[in-house]
Image (spheres, rainbow, N blue to C red):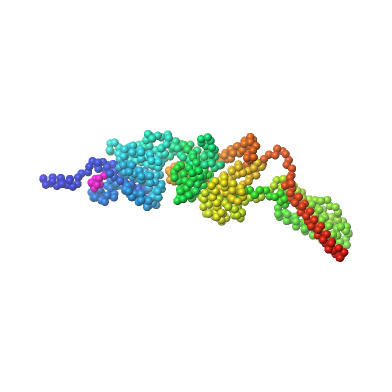
Amino acid sequence: MKWLMGLLFLGGLLNPPPSSEAILHQQQMRLFGSFLRELEKAYFEGCSLIVFYNSSLSEGQRKIFQPNGKSGEGEHQSLIDVLLTYARNFTKIIFRLKEGLPDILEDTNLNIITRCPVYLTVSSAIEDIHNLFLLANKDWDKYFLSRKHLIFTESPAVDVDNFLRADEINTMTALLILRPSSDSESLQVVTNRPYSMNPPYSASDQLAYTLTTWRGRVLDLSDAHFFPDKLTNFFGYQMRVVTFHFPPRIFMIEEENSFQLYGVDVDVVQALSEALNFSLVYGRPSDNEMWGWEKDAGNWTGLMGDLQHRRADIGVADLYIMESYFAIIDMSIAYDIEYLCFVNLVPGPLPQWMALGLPFLLNAWIAVLISIVAGMVLFVFMVKLGLLSGSESEAPWFHDVANLCLYLYASVMNTTLFREPRASHLRIFTAFWSIAFFILASAYKGSLISFLTVPLEQAPIDTHKQLYEKHIDVGSIGYTLKRVMEKNADRFVRLLALRYQHVPSTDEGLQRTLKGKYSFLESRGFLDYTIAVYYTDKRGRPSLHAMREYIAPFGIGLAYPKYVPYVGKFNRVIRRLTEAGFAKKWMADIILRSKRAKVMASGTDNQAGVTEGPGEISSTNGVIQPLSLDNLQGGFILLGIGLLLSVVAFVFELLAKQICWGTSTVC
C-alpha cells in the first residue's frame, strides 16, 4: 500500500494538477468559445476566422493544457486550442502576436484568401495589440478597421477605454470586447461609441459601454443587438471639411476672422450633417493649392493630399469621380453630372464689309449670278435673232451687246428702265425679269439692314478637330486631366494632350485664354457661370466661349480618406438627395441668386465692371442708334473699288487712243 501511495505521490510531482489560475483561463476560453459559436450562427455563417493571439501562461501551464496531454512546439497554445474547438465551421487563419508579425502580414493578401473575414484577437493585456490595430490600411486587409472584430482581454475597464481612444481605433463600427466579469463565471460584452473623441464628449467620458453579460446560454438576439448600425448618429462629431472658392459649386466669401460658405457642394455636405448629426469645420487645403496633383512617390498636394494623409474627413470642390483618384482616396456616389470641355476666346464679329454678302447663303448667291448671266445671254440672243429675221426694227441703242447687258443690270438693281424694247417678246421677258429681281432685291435690302445694324458673330470653335487645327496650347490645373485626355477615344483629344501645359490657377488659365494662344479645360458649369459673371459685357456679348463638344461626362462626388467606414452611410443619404432632385434645385437657386446680385449691383453702381449675363442686351432707353461708318463700310468699299476700276479703264482707253491715233479704223 505504501508503494502505491509513493507512486501516486511521484506521479503528482511529475504531472502536477492544474492550478486554479489555469482552470480559470480554461473556463473563460470555453465561455468565449460558446459565445463565438452563437455569434457564428447569427452573424458569421460562411465567413473566415482570422485569429491573433498571445498568452501570459507559463510553459508548465501550456504543457498541462496541450490537446491529449501532449506537449507541442508552442506555436498554437493550449487556450487557443480550447477556444477553436468551438469554431469548427469556420475557415481559420491563425497568427501569433510576435515581433515579425507585421512583415508576415505585409506578405499576405487576406482579401484574396478569405470570405467576409471576422477578426478574433486574444490578448491578456489589451495594450499589447494596440500597434496591431494601428497597422490598418495596409495591403493585407485595407478594410481592417471596418471588419467585425472580437477581442478577448483580461485588462481592466480603464485600459479598454484608453485603447478605444486611439484616433483610428475610435472609428471602428463593428467591435466587441469580452473581458471576465467580477464573478469570474461570466464574460462582460463591451462595445464602443465610434466618432466620439471630440465635443460634446470630454476626456472623462467613457467610450466603452456594456451590452450584456454572457453566461454560456443560447444567444437571444432580443437581449442585445451585437452589431448595430452605429453611424445613424454621430452625436455632434466635428468633421473636418477641406474646400476652396470655386463658384458656382463653392462660394467662400472672406469675413473679418472667418469666411462665409455657400454653394451646391456646401449644401450637400450640410444636408449630410443634418441627417447624421455631425458638425462641420471648414478649412482650405493646408498648402494653399486647389485640388492638387501627384508630386513625388505617390504623395499628393492640395485637397487630395490633405485627404490622403488624413488631415481632413471630407473633401468637396466640384470633384470628378475618376479612377485615378481611388489609389489615394475614396469617393461617394455622384450627386450631380458635369461635363469637361475647353473654353476659347470668342472670335468676335465678322468685318462689316462682309455684311453685303450675308443676307443670302452661298447657294442663293450662286443661283442669282447664274440667273443674271443666263438672262443676259438669252436676252442678247433674242434681240439679235429678231434683227436677223427682219421683224420690227429696234432702236439703234439695242444693237450694242454692252447696252443690252446694262439694260438688264439696271433692272436687277431696281433702277427705272430708261428705254423700252419694241418687240412684244422682249417686253414680256423684261416684265418678268423685273418682277423676279424686284422680289430678290426687296428680300436682300430687308436682310441687309439687319446685318448692317447688328454685326454677325464669327462661328466659335466647337469641336476638338477645329481646336487642334488652330495650333494653340491647351491645359488645366495639375496633370490629372492630361491623363484623362491621353486615354480619350477621340483621336484629336489625344493629339491635344501632347500640347498640354499646366497652369497654377483658374484665373491664370482664363487670362491666357483671353490672349488667344491658349485653351483652358474645366467643367462646363464652372465655365458657364464664370463667363456670365466676369467675361460678358453690358450688351450681353461674352468674350469667352465653352465648346459644345466635351471630353467626357463626370459624376460629381465627395472625397474621403481611404477606407473610412462612413462612406456607405453617406452614400445612402446622397442617393436620397439625388432622387429628390435637390442638387439641380440648389444649382438653379445659385444662378438665380447671382443674377439678382448683378441686377442690384447694376442698379446702384454704374461702373464698367458690372456686367450682364449672356444674351441680356443692355437697354438703349428707346434711343435709335444711327448707323456709323463702320456699319456702312461695305458700301464705301464697293464705291472705292468701282472708282478704281473706272480709273484703270480710263487709263487704258487713253493709252489705246494714243497708240491707235490715226493708224487704224479698228482703234
Residue 337 in sight here: yes
Q: Is residue 58 magenta?
A: yes
Q: Quadrant of residue 176?
A: top left
Q: Main secondary structure of the magenta part?
A: helix
Q: Quadrant of residue 388?
A: bottom right
Q: Residue at x 33, y 40 (%)?
A: 178
Magenta region, residue range = 57-64
Describe residue 508's horizontal placement relative to residue 38 as left or right: right
User: Which corner quadrant of the image does residue 154 belong to?
Assistant: top left
Above or below — where is 407 with respect to 594? Answer: below
Residue 667 in the image, given as x and y percentages of width and height: 85, 63
Q: Nearer the viewer, residue 542 or 414?
A: 542
> In this figure, what is the number of numbered marks?
0
| Residue at figure coordinates x 53%, y 47% from the top left | 504
Q: Residue furthest bottom?
A: 663
Q: In this image, 267 relative to 55: left or right?
A: right
Residue 267 location in percent, x, y?
52, 39
x, y percent for residue 349: 67, 48
Q: In this image, 564 relative to 416: left or right? A: left
Q: Quadrant of the N terminus?
A: top left
Question: Residue 526 magenta-drawn?
Answer: no
Seen at 32% across and 48% down, the residue is 98
**Image x and y of residue 259, in percent:** 52, 37
**Residue 583 in view:** no
Q: Is residue 404 left or right of residue 53?
A: right
